[in-house]
Image (cartoon, grey):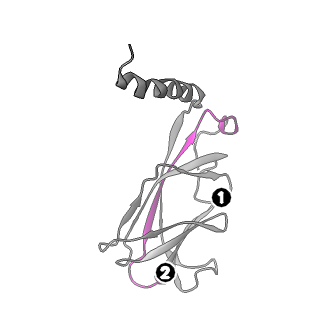
Amino acid sequence: MLSRRNLLTAGLAVPALALAKRRPRMDLRPLGQFTVTATADTTGQNTGNWTNAFTTALLPDVNTYEIYRMTVKNVAALGSAQIILRNQQFSTVQADLSGRNEWDPSQPQPLNAGDEVYYFWNYAASGVAPVVTLWLRFDADLPQNSASRGGH
């Protein structure tokens, strides 16, 4: 005889097993932390304000990778930034009263070789410059990353 518990959980076991079988194998390898101190904007898109620019000269030479954590510090209390990827805003950040914040997403942000990430702050470039740190990783099992070692 089936109990109420068996009836409620029986339908969950099969989909969970099926999902586990469909999940791709991943070999996530850290690429390290990348820190940029803001400078007065040179992109022409945030004139007169602070900008943190994670350019191709700084980011790793890996075909496909992801941002799995970001932190900001030294930001004016409650200062905010638009986070730009592929010339589009993909997120925003606002500092707390101590000038800090952190982003630890449930869904990491994918990046491709050649992508650049910018933080366009909403206040003038004077005083202490904001500092942004990105934590990056890549999946070594992806065919497009087979030759990557995660170097800069």
**Which residue: 59% across, 31% down?**
24
Against 146, residue 134 (above or below) is below
The answer to which of 15 and 24 lies nearer the viewer is 15
Q: Check the image and report above or below for 13 versus 98.
A: above
Q: CA distance from mark 1 to mark 2?
A: 23 Å
Q: Quadrant for the N terminus, please.
A: top left
The range drawn in magenta is 122-146
Q: Amino acid at mark 2?
A: Asn
- Provide residue 47's location: percent of width, then percent of height: 58, 85
SS for dot 2: strand
Quick one: label 1 or label 2, which is nearer the N terminus? 1
Q: Position of residue 136 (x, y in %)?
A: 51, 49
Examine the image and state in which quarter residue 87 appears.
Answer: bottom right
Identity of the residue furthest to the top in this view: 1
Give the residue at x 65% y 39%. 145
Q: Position of residue 13 (x, y in %)?
A: 47, 24
Does residue 20 lie above or below 74 as drawn? above
Other-residue count near label 1 (Cα within 10 Å), few / some / many at <14 / 14–19 / ≥20: some
Q: For the residue labelled by badge 1, is the local secondary structure a helix, a strand or a loop?
A: loop
Give the tally of numbered discs.
Answer: 2
Label 1 with label 2: CB-CB less than 8 Å? no
The residue lying at 29 percent from left, 72 percent from top is 98
Badge nearest the viewer, 1 or 2: 2
The 10 Å Cα crowd at callout 2, few under 14, some 14 to 19, many 20 or more, is: some
Queried whether the magenta region covers residue 33, the answer comes back as: no
Q: Which residue is mark 2?
A: 122
In this rendering, position of residue 2 left or right of residue 55: left
- Inspect the image, locate mark 1, and give the three-letter code of the amino acid beneath it: Asp
Q: Which residue is mark 1?
A: 115
Q: Nearer the viewer, residue 18 or 146?
A: 18
Expressed as whole percent of the image width and height from the top left, the position of residue 67 reads 52, 52
Q: Which disc is residue 129 wearing?
A: none
